[in-house]
Amino acid sequence: QMLVSISVKRAFSKKPKEEVVPEEDFLQRVLPPPSQYVEDVNMALFINGFFHVRRVIVTEESIFFSMPGNDDIIDEIPLAECTEVKIPRMNEADPFEHDGNQYSHCLQIETELDGYNAGRYYILKVLKVDDHDRLLKGLSKLVKVARQRRLALSRFQRSQGHMRKIFKSEIFQKVSALIIFANFAQSIVEAQLIGARDNDPSRDGIQDVFERVNTVNSTL
């Protein structure tokens, strides 16, 4: 009997095993569904002095980078945090191919200093010449729209903040309590007048006044 009780205690004293989630599940991020894609193109990304081919996915919210033929995200640029999309300029010491004073068929994306990319700039080279102007114009337009959308949202959130401050203010709370009390008192007096009016029709004028007051209270 003692052995049975001990085994039962051990069975109930064991802590349930915690589910171990692979570390990759926390860090791995995959591309959004294709229905959100505005562009899906391979480009050469300038990294540490060399161009490396990357898959570039553009949505209305972000630019995503992954390896060609792969759906795992390796970097992202929120469009609302892009400050400019332009043709990069070069100095005489730069060893890249160039036409005149510009990188050949390249785009430069600049980001906000206090944003997700911490002010980094990205130089991308198109693999097809015909894609250059289209991507330059398309990305510039998407960035402009995204930044306008963020500004509008910021203004709306500030307005919400101001309204919350007003609602939580002591004056607003007191005025609200006073209106509620006035409405309650009016209901009591009005109930008394309805009975008195039935006995004295001359009190109809007073009832009209209370109906107007009731309309004002309801509006407030």
Image: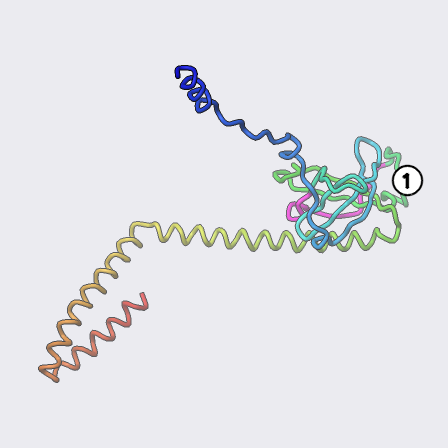
Rendered position, 113 above or below 59: above
Q: Quadrant of residue 3?
A: top left
| Residue that mark 1 sits on | 97
Residue pushed farthest front?
Answer: 1
Residue at 76% over, 52% down: 39
Q: Position of residue 116 (x, y in %)?
A: 63, 39
Q: Quadrant of residue 149?
A: bottom right
Q: Is residue 25 left or right of residue 68?
A: left
Type of amino acid under label 1: Glu
Is 78 part of what is drawn in magenta? Answer: yes
Q: Position of residue 125 (x, y in %)?
A: 83, 43
The stretch in magenta equals 77-91
Rendered position, 189 above or below 62: below
Residue at 52% over, 53% down: 155
Residue pushed farthest top?
Answer: 2
Q: Quadrant of residue 193?
A: bottom left
Residue at 42% over, 20% down: 9
Rendered position, 198 above or below 147: below
Viewer-proximal residue among 48 and 67: 67
| Position of the C terminus by quadrant | bottom left
| Position of the N terminus by quadrant | top left
Q: Position of residue 93 (x, y in %)?
A: 86, 33
Q: Is residue 20 left or right of residue 35?
A: left
Viewer-proximal residue among 122 and 188: 188
Viewer-proximal residue among 185 and 12: 12
Residue at 43% over, 19% down: 4
Secondary structure, mark 1, is: loop
Residue pushed farthest left?
Answer: 199
